[in-house]
Each structure stands twice: as structure tokens, then as C-alpha cells.
Image (cartoon, coloured by chain):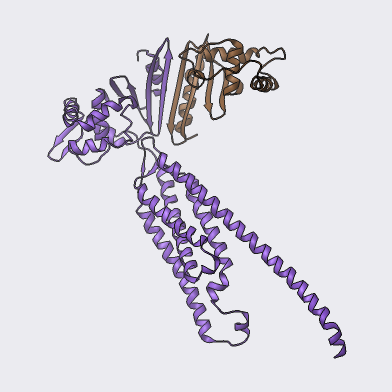
Chain colours: A purple, B brown
Amino acid sequence: MVLDAAFAPQANLGLKILSFFTTGAFFLITLFLKLCYSTALYATLAEISRRIALFRQTRRPALRALLLLPAVVVFCTAILFALNLWRVVFGSLDLKGFTQAFNPMDIIWVFLRGGFFLGAVALGAVLGLMVANHVTLGRDRFGGVLYKNRGRYLAFWFAAFSVCGLFRLLPWGFVTYWTVWVVVLAACLVTAAHWSIYGKVRSVAAATAPGLPAGGEIAFTLAAREAVALSALLRGRAPRDAEALARSLADPDPSWLAHPAWTAELRVLVQDPSALGAALEGLSVKGLAAKNGKGWSPAGPAARLRLMGFAETAAGLTVRKAGAARTVVLHLQGPSALLLEPGPATLGVREFPRGADAVAALVGAAEGRAG
Amino acid sequence: MIETRLSLGEARYLLQVLDLKLAPESPLADPLGGAAEVPAGSTAEAGVAKSLTSRGLLLSDGAPNPFAAAAMVWLAQPEKAWTLSLFGRGGAAMVHLAFKGGSAVECRRDAEGFLLRYPLPEAEAEGWLRLHVDGGRHGS
């Protein structure tokens, strides 16, 4: 007893020192994890912002971004989940609760909480696949993959990350079971949706271009307004009336038939229905457009152009010589090649026979050589 | 083939040293046509000259390297110039070829300046174009 009393203060001091260093170590580890988490989150938000800006400019998804985003979201969610694992799975139950009163109701609650988390994972995956199912992919005019309904995709993207960001901004004490549950749900949703979209993008990108379908030879010259009107006709699948075509031309992303220098002509066709009507009639006379009860649609060689849809590669060659310039554009898709010669007032479109040397023809046309 | 990278300031300075005026056909006319000259005797001139000398593009007496000088003459006052714009799965690219006296110099513009490759015989220009178009076709 005397000995115990003599050593007690020293033992208490040792425990205090040990406790101090243990608490300090835990503090530093937690701080490090929080810093990692915050850094990753801010980096993600910056990357998202950059990707969205790029996406809005080009409408082309970057394949790596599709994998990067869910990877970072899963990483951040996993850390948040790990930091709160005990609280969200075992609730207010602490270690003493395990060692002292073994309450069967607590065990049931632990299983319920774990089960609900698995429900969040399953629900998130299903919702993610449903969202991805509603994202339609297509080709832009140069064969790149684009999201047709980008607005919906961006809205989903913003909403999911806003939820994640909101929960991170809230104080730790606010992170209850259900907030973590929603974060897990959102992470699974984002991951499943991106995983599905990634697969779609890869399959679309890997699809082999069929080239031009068989049919009448493409070799015609159009006036500027006719070329712009044809570009509108080639966009849609169903026949459309003149009003619908004018609305289509108002889209700032014209087809590859519309020369950038023809903006004024395009504006006239959008604003003046009679000018558009005259251009369509001109196309009809050349056998490139036909009108039925439902409206205008491409005909003859123009119908083949619409089936081609996009070009895998477009090579524009401008030759400047003696103060003059001449531009010729070659569109390649699979075994097919089209040569476009845009002039100040006309557009020449010519198809090459399969196997012909299209590059030599491109040089010849741009240099002004016969051939 | 010689490959030379030039910043906008370095290209402008070489034009000054060689006393070259830009022809309308020149691929440099657009980026450098309105650029101010590097002031003689300024610290900017000293920096540009030091950078060019360290890479052998200026000789110790301040005269341009003959190869670089020839490339700048072709670029600034070409008899003919090609501009190839490529769009495809690999993205978009633009590259120029300036011809003079049976030879050509390739010029690519990027954020830092120009990348020049020379000399290319004029007879091989079509092969050069074919390489670029076929390369773009395969997404490279």
C-alpha cells in the first residue's frame, strides 16, 4: 500500500504524457486525412469546372474525364465513409456498450444500418444506369462522339456534385447517418452512370464507318443559299416544312456543307421564308430535294449524303500564291471520299470512286490543276 | 531534317536581323504582321539574342545561322504557301508549308510560338500531305 501510494503520481504522469502524444498523433492523422480529402475534393471541383467549360465548347466528351470523375468521387466518399464508419454503422454505441450490456436491439440496429447502406449502393447503381440510359450519343460532323442531350447530362452532373459538395461543407457534427447515406447513394449513382456512358462512348468510337451507301453519283455545284438549305435538310431524318428548316438553320452549329463565309446567306434564309423556299426549289430542280405532304427531304445523291452522316477525317488545303487563295476540303469516311470546293458564291461537291487517290486530287484541285 | 522552335519574339527578332518584310502568303503574316519590333539595345533584345545564341541560331558575331536564315526567308517571303487544316478523331490541327526555290519549310503554331522543320524538297510535298491526312485518319 505504501509502495502503491509512492508510485501513483509518477504512473499518472506517464499516462498523461502517453495520452498527450497519442491524442496528438491521432489529431495529426485526422488532420492529414481531412487535408487529403479537401484537396482531392477541390481538385475534383476544379477539374469538373474545366471539363464542363471544355464540354460546352466542343460538345465532345473526353474519355479520360469519364473515368477520372467517378474515381475521385469514390475516393472522396470512401474517406468520408471511413472517417464516420463507426458513427454511421454503430450509431451511439461505443466500445463500453459492447463490453458491458449486450443489447440484442443494438445488434438489430447495426444490421439495419448496414442493410440500408447496401440499399444505397444498389439504388445508386440502378439510378446511375437509368440516367446513362437517357444519355444519347451521336457523331459530330467529323466523327467525334457527342452527347445529344447534353443539357440533361450537365444538370445531372451539377446536381450530383452539388449534393456531394454540400455535405462536405457542412460541419462534421452534421454528418449524420442519412447524410452519409445520401453521399454513398450519389457516389454510386455517379460511378454507375459514368461506367455505363464510358462503355457507350467506347463502342460508338470503335464502330467502323460504313462509307457512302450505293446510289447515284454525287457530283453537283450549288449556289451558296442552296448549299445552306441542303445543310439543313441533311440534319433531320423526317421530312420537314420550311419553318422547321429555318428553325434548324438558326442553330449556330451548321452542317459541314455550310461555308463559314456564308453567315449572311444563312441569316437571310432564317429570316426570309421566300428566300428559303426559292433555295429549296433550286435543290428540287437539281434533283437533290423532294417535297411531299409532310415537307421537304433530301433526294437522289443528297439522300446518300445524309446516310453518310459524318466524316472521319476532314482535310482542308488552302493554297496561297501570287496574292490569290484557293481552299479545297476533302472528307473521308471509311472507303469513301468527297471533295468540297467552297468558293465565294458556290460549293462544288464531288464523290471519288472507291480506290481513287483522293489526296492527289485534293492537291490538284487546290493548286488549280485540271483533273 | 532540322527542327527549330522559336518563340514569337525570337521569330520577330530574326525577321528584323534579316530585314525581311512579310509577304501576304507568309504563314507568319497573321501572328507576326502586327507585332511590334524588338527595340534595339533593350533588355528584351539582349534576352532574345542570348536565347538564340545559346541554341546556335545566332552566331557569335550576331549574324543568323545560315540554315535558320534560309528557313526564315522561305517562311517570310514564300512563292507559295499551303495551309493544311485537319479535323478528325484525333482532334484538330493546322500546319503550314511555305515553298521557295524548290524547297519548303513546315511551320506549326502553338501557344509558345512556332515549330519549324526544314528543308523539305517541293517534290515531296504531296507525300508530306498524304502522311498528314492518313495519320489523321488513324487518329494520331
Query: Residue visible at 46% across and 44% down?
Result: A62
Query: Residue visible at 42% across and 9% down?
Result: A322
The quarter of the displayed image where residue A265 is located? top left
Query: Residue visible at 53% across and 82% down?
Result: A107
Picture coordinates of residue A287 (x, y %)? Answer: 19, 27
A52 or A346: which is nearer to us? A52
Picture coordinates of residue B62 (x, y %)? Answer: 69, 13
- Quadrant including the N terminus of chain B: top right
Q: Is residue A129 above or below residue A21?
A: above
A84 or A370: which is nearer to us? A84
Q: Is residue A238 above or below residue A360?
A: below
Q: Residue furthest left?
A: A293
Evaluate whether residue A355 shows in this view.
no
Q: Is residue A65 above or below residue A222?
A: below
Q: Tell me: A15 left or right of B138.
A: right
Picture coordinates of residue A238 (x, y %)? Answer: 21, 41
Q: Tell me: A25 left or right of B108.
A: right
A355 or A75: which is nearer to us? A75
